Image: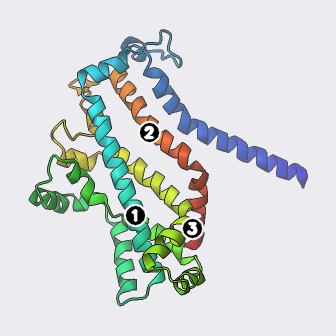
Amino acid sequence: MRKHKKLKVLIISIITSIAAGVIIIPFIWMFLSAFKPSEEIMRVIPTFFPENPTFGAFKKVFKLLPFALFFRNSIIVSITVTCSVLFSSSLIGYCLAKFRFLGRDILFLLVLLTMVLPFEIIVIPLFILIRDLRMINSLQGLILPFVVDSFGIFLCTQFILGIPSDYMDAARIDGLSEWDIYLRIIIPLIKPVLSALCIFCFFWQWGFILWPLVVASSDKVKTIPLGIMLLQTQRGFIYDLTLAAASMTIAPTLIIFIIMRKYFVKGVALSGLKA
């Protein structure tokens, strides 16, 4: 039995390592290729490690494009949307999970139904709304449609349903208001799921291209994905500059994941069990 268990663990480890390699190696290759000159990237027999490492591509990116401005816009939009989603999802999730009111179940069902709709279906109505609000070519126009997220509401609601209501009842007896209960009891207890939601939301918003492509036509409000698209010419992408720009865009997502990694797996697992 021990031999079978060891063999099973060995097989699982090998399969997991291969799968991880398939996912990680392209990113490593992209990062290393950012330090290669264009001629070496286009070589028929490619090299994995750069033969003559250079920072020339990184310098050219900032000379050709206002990349620092794109980076700032992406940071502002991603952080603002993520904070708004965390606040709205936790607050609405608390109300849906712990309060009984007329139409609560129908409202929650409608929230779930919005998760089924692809974003492409609502692009035109959203564009008309943002246009009427005169938010075209503005950071507000990039942020406003995403301050509330149905997936975040679902995740927080399912997690909060598993919190015993006795905690809230005891707090009410002690004289705490509902707002204090939300801040001092609910928020500390749902930190794992909020951390997972933070990673999901920031990653999605950071690499999102469709909505900025529709709303942002001015360089003043363009985000990093649109900036990378500007590196495309009639002959295709400028590979060394594109790889350098893409390598720099990964840094914030890695930082967020490293900070939140302690709670990420726990949050996903617990929220799944509550479902």
Quarter of the figure with the N terminus: bottom right
Classify 49 as above or below 137: above
- Work out whether 108 lies above or below 43: below
Residue 87 badge? 1
Q: CA distance from mark 2 to mark 1?
A: 21 Å
Residue 252: mark: 2
- Image coordinates of residue 39 in percent, x first then y, are 38, 11
- Dividing the picture into quarters, in which one does residue 234 lie? top left
Of mark 2 and mark 1, the one earlier in the sequence is 1
Q: Considering the numbered disc 2 on the image, is that residue within a helix, a strand or a loop?
A: helix
Q: Residues within 10 Å of mark 3 (few under 14, many from 20)?
A: some
- Residue 169 shows up from this direction: yes
Query: What amino acid does circle 1 point to?
Result: Phe
Q: Which quadrant, please, contains the C terminus?
A: bottom right
Q: Residue at x 42, y 64 (%)?
A: 152
CA separation in Å, label 1 and label 3 = 14 Å
- Residue drawn at x 39%, y 78% is 108
Dot 2 and dot 1 residues touching (CB under 8 Å): no
What's the amino acid at mark 2?
Answer: Pro
Q: Which residue is mark 3?
A: 189
